[in-house]
Amino acid sequence: MAGHSQFKNIMHRKGAQDARRSKLFSKLAREITVSAKQGLPDPEKNPKLRAAIIAARKENMPKDNIERAIKKALGGDAENYEEARYEGRGPGGISMIVEALTDNRNRTSGDVRSLFSKHGGQMGETVTYQFDRLGQIQYPADKATPDEMLEAAIEAGADDCQSGDQAHDVYCASDSLNEVREGLEKRFGPASLAKLVWRPQSTVSVEGDAAQSLVKLLEALDDHDDVQNVYANFEMSDETLAKVAG
């Protein structure tokens, strides 16, 4: 998932890590609360909640924070957030999908539209046809060899396995996520990530001024309290990535 992975790379290399971590924990807690409120509070019986907890653990979110987020849903005083998705074009003509959890659709829609416009993009064009909706399960690279992970992924019912220096990414049909995750966990233990994602079918190379504008847009979206996930179909050269993330 080139654009998504590179986006995470950029954010990791940027400063103000403590502030970003605090905001990230708030977003993860919101995801957990909403998932628990929409279904059962037991992650073993609520795949969406389990995925949210796995994502929180991947970011080293304290156990107390996770439990507090679940209890907030049980208490009945949690805010009524709803899921929203926004699509559009970013700098360099790339396609972008923004997922949010909001208690005010008009506010969030206006904010996201404004951020697109400010940074050389345009919200409103449908682009989901350029992405595949898939389940993604991730393990650290040292958990298994690429061949071992590929074999296990096939046995579990996955469609694809991509192994790199940092991680193994297993992809499956969206409705098979829980089944494939359970199959892999029997062999390798808990996954470091297990969620539904948008994976681009192809990518667009972005360089120069467009790359700089794109990073500013990604940063602004990542900084917005309501935005949970951003997916984009871009590629950047290592040289450009180093410049924009300097």
Image (cartoon, rainbow, N blue to C red):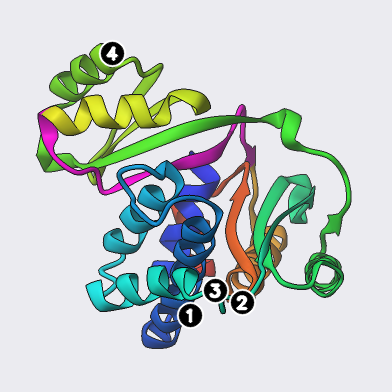
Q: Earlier in the sequence, mark 1 or mark 4?
A: 1
The x and y percentages for residue 33 are 48, 66
Mark 3 vs mark 2: in front:
3
Q: Which amino acid does label 4 sit on?
A: Ile
Q: Distance between the residues labelled 4 and 2?
A: 38 Å
Viewer-proximal residue among 51 and 99: 51
Give the side of residue 58 with respect to residue 38, left or right. left
Question: Dots 4 and 2: beta carbons under 8 Å?
Answer: no
Q: Name the residue rendered at 63%, 47% in the picture.
A: 232
Q: What stretch is highlighted in magenta?
A: 187-204
Q: Note whether residue 237 is visible.
A: no
Under tag 2, what secondary structure? Answer: loop
Q: Name the residue under label 2.
A: 225
Relative to 48, 107 lies left or right:
right
Q: Give yes or no for residue 160 being in the magenta stretch.
A: no
- Which amino acid, mark 3? Gly
* Front residue of this view, candidates 39 and 128: 39
- The mark tally for this picture is 4
